[in-house]
Image (cartoon, rainbow, N blue to C red):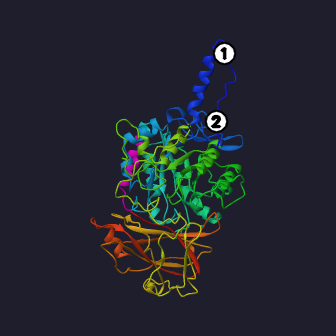
Amino acid sequence: MFNKIIIFTSLKKRIIPIVVIIAMMMSLTPILAVKADSNYTHLIGNSTVKKPSVGGALQILNKNNTSTLCDKNGEPIQLRGMSTHGLQWFPGIINNNAFAALSNDWNANVIRLAMYVAEDGYATNPSVEQNVINGINYAIANDMYVIVDWHVLNPGDPNASIYSGAQNFFNKIASLYPNCKNIIYELCNEPNNIGQGVSDDAAGWAKVKSYATPIINSLRNSGNKNLVIVGDPFWSQRPDLAADNPINDSNTAYSVHFYSGTNPVSDVDTNRDNAMSNVRYALNHGVAVFATEWGTSLATGTTGPYLEKADAWLDFLNANNISWCNFSICNKDEKAAALNSSASLDPGSDHVWSDSELTTSGQYVRARIKGIYYNTPVDPTPSKPSAPTDFSSGFWDFNDGTTQGFGINADSPITAVTVENSNNALKLSGLNTNGSNDLSEGNFWANVRLSADIWGKSINIYGDTKLTMDVIAQTPTNVSIAAIPQSNSNGWANPTRAISVSTNNFVRQADGTYKATLTISTDDSPNLKTIASDSSDSTVINMILFVGSSSDSISLDNIKFSK
């Protein structure tokens, strides 16, 4: 770590030497207190970060043989700002005070409105569209660009029937705000291979392209020249695929999403398993890239923040004039959130969230948007009492190097399975060879039974509706899990069924392993429903898991309750 020192190379002769010395000492004082930003050369300053009132309509132009986002005058412009979380869950962020705080105190010139389509979003709750319209109005009033995000997540194919309203939605927004300089259209958040999604290859990108092209043509035919951003396969980590087969439109960019704790940096453009390498490839092959979503945590939103790794990413983005939005401006109890869980989404009439209302991530991102030195963070205020308190992130993350209480339950029919912490995950070995391989919904009793009897901690899950966990394997496999969370008042209720993930649910990770996310609902686990709705005792103190696998070894990670 090294501190930047400002060296004055010339001084006017008429300045008295002692005054010079004092002035120099004063100039050094605040810099010595900051975190070491001198490892990178593109973190300080924001000369190309222009508001719509200055930048005007956005366009992609060729600058130094690179497709570059430019302002109305053809000069490079960079957008830096925040993304909301799902507007169906955090509609309260849509208020003028919040938008004014981001624009004026944070100096953001863009906000992204994440309108989930599935996940209780637009498809089943079309009223969320009004949140988007209100957000657009607040963005325009506060001189920010605004990304209208059609948030494709699960299923991962934007052509799926649940997303059939995309064309009508974008036509409506375009008709309400014809050719508005503030608006950017993001046509599909994160194409991926979940739920009959799209593959992580050229064929997967071809499906995304076939979805996006008619929407872009419709926008252009109606006179809208706005910037369009299109997501790409593998959760928008493959802009290289778009570069090999771009959409025939001069004002379309392609997204990259990354989380600094999950996605490593790269100085080459040849590694197809690395998101930054894929961005380098895309730039070198003639298309523009926009980081519409990135976080300081793991991709799960948990653990961290990984700020030095975030610095490396932002230095790369800024150096290449790639615009970015941090995920997310919300008060969810997770490391990626910018606001503490006790902070209000409305900062009040002074249009300022204090440092104590911001998480470490929020304080860091605010500084990086402004292009100023990042100072030692103020300790955030404690989470509200009802928030999860397990370890650092509110659930079993296994990042402390232990099994966090999990072992073979005393009543397990199979006891030869090995349970250990490996690579900060709960590794189970000997499953298939010892008969813990029943994948049916109802016969989970035949499989090994785990429990966290010696955990000694607790999680308040009041109001939560699901239990999720990552399943990690060396190769895609089949895994079946049933669960019984337990509280002091609700010790046991048989699971309704076991839930499975199969080989086609697994996605290859940067480290060569494969991961799938398994989700258990309150219908699958009656005890989950009972505890989560018990206002007098909604605290989980133990977890029973019945695990079957067609592979001998798997790992579980990020076992988490959520709404």
Circle 1 packing at 10 Å, graded few (<14), some (14-19), many (20+), is few
Quadrant for the C terminus in the image: bottom left
Circle 2 packing at 10 Å, graded few (<14), some (14-19), many (20+), is some
Three-letter amino acid code at disc 1?
A: Lys
Most foreground residue, 62 or 303 = 303
Residue at the disc numbered 2: 4
Q: Report the span colored magenta.
A: 124-138
Tell me where residue 480 appears, x and y as whole percent: 49, 79
Q: Which mark is on residue 12?
A: 1
- Residue 146 shows in the view: no
Tell me where residue 160 appears, x and y as whole percent: 49, 66
Contact? badges 2 and 1 (CB < 8 Å): no
Most foreground residue, 308 or 188 = 308
Q: Indicate the quadrant where residue 235 lies.
A: bottom right
Q: Residue extending furthest left?
A: 536
Residue at position x 36%, y 49% from top?
Answer: 92
Quadrant for the N terminus in the image: top right
Direction from residue 496 to residue 500 in the image, left or right: right
